[in-house]
Image (tube, rainbow, N blue to C red):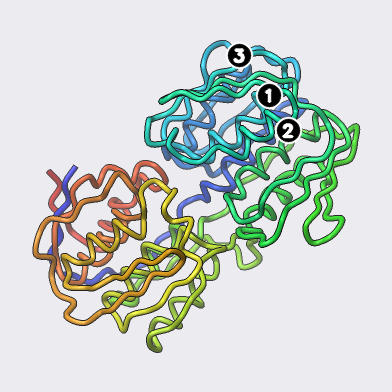
Amino acid sequence: MQVTFTPQKASGTVKAPPSKSMAHRLLIAAAMSEGTSVVHGLSGSEDVCATLDCLAALGVSYTRNGDTATLCGTDMTKAVPSGDLYCRESGSTLRFMIPIALLSGNEVTLVGAPSLMKRPMGIYEDICREKGLCFAKKDNAITVKGPLPAGEYVLPGDVSSQFITGLLFALPCVGESRIRILPPFESRSYVDLTLSALRDFGVAVEWEDAYTLFIPANTRFTARICEVEGDYSNAAFLDALNLLGSDVTVTGLRADSLQGDRVYRDYFEALKKGCPTLNISDCPDLGPILFALAAAGQGGVFEGTRRLRIKESDRAAVMAEELAKFGTRVTVEEDRVTVDPNGFHAPTAPLFGHNDHRVVMSMAVLCTKVGGTVTGAEAVGKSYPDFFDDLKALGVETVVS
């Protein structure tokens, strides 16, 4: 899909889309609960659909009516998969599901796009080797076989927190355990989101100290009715329009949210004031839109960017490639990105989305200011399928081809 913009300002009020991060967590907790749970406020994003597909393959029955899913939970230690687990392109789904797939002791194969399978999975591979479990990786699939034992698990804290979350869902089903996290601990806020979802479903996991999580024995998930909160990471793309001259009000965000990406408002203020140095190690998903705004503004230096290489694309590199079309020089180092805004102008060539939803949305935001064409725009379906509809509701007209 190709979307073409002319320079125009957005105006109006828009509700933030539901949090994909919380949707994954609430759906998994509901699927592992005794009884029937109801989860309101789901989006139609590809990633959320992937998680629902995997849960169904593990024997969870559910119905969906609009933005609401009703799930009848199952005992994952006895679940027998009806087929492979299809994770599509969702890194969260794959990493959350691997420990759950290890619970039953049955052989389970998780299938995904080749780009997904290129993401690092060494943490789980190491755990399986240490615990004597099966972990076999191919180009488009990972096959695992448990059962996952209770005990102590040691994980580095400077890789994706999704590995920690996956274990946090599975270990309450097997007995008293501990997860020890080796510092530095990045993306702690995402672990806090997981702990919040667990508490909502009756599972009390506690911090013993700053780096140790204690999972008590004889813990059961309890069914409940809940709602997915608004998503700060995607709301950032809507709010970013205001830094480019638009007048947009974003609603539906919890002021007391645990989402690490809520820091975007503070970072936007810093970008408005000058050329700041910002650390994004705890909020890497904000990287593309922060780079884009720095390009259109007064520049910026961004630290803690190392993990951007292992997202849907190599986000630092591809943003440097696309921002060059706006006349912006971006210097990418091992753990730092510097954006020099000199000469920002309308793009000299069509922009490419690199099959990355956040890159597409960042380019679209810039195009509302100077015009341009974004190719591969269908990638927004991964997390925010209504993005272009919401822009249209705010008065941003586009030509789609």
Label 1, on which residue? 102
The first of marks 1 and 2 along the sequence is 1
Which residue in the structure is indicated by mark 3?
81
The single residue placed furthest to the bottom in the displayed view is 273
Residue under pointer 2: 170
Task: Evaluate if marks 1 and 2 touch, with contact meaning CB atoms under 8 Å apart.
Answer: yes
Q: Secondary structure at mark 1?
A: loop
Residue 158 appears in the picture as rendered: yes
The residue at 9%/64% (across/down) is 348
Report the amino acid beneath label 2: Ala
Q: Nearer the viewer, residue 133 or 28?
A: 133
Quarter of the view holding residue 359: bottom left
Image side of residue 350 versus residue 234, left or right: left
Closest to the camera, between mark 1 and mark 3, is 1
Residue 101 screen position, x and y as percent: 64, 24
Three-letter residue code for mark 3:
Pro
Q: Looking at this rendering, what residue extends furthest in the left direction? A: 348
Query: How far, Cα to Cα, is label 1 from label 2?
Result: 8 Å
Determine whether label 1 and label 3 are within 8 Å by CB. no
Quadrant of the snapshot with the C terminus = top left
* Rendered view: 105 above or below 360: above
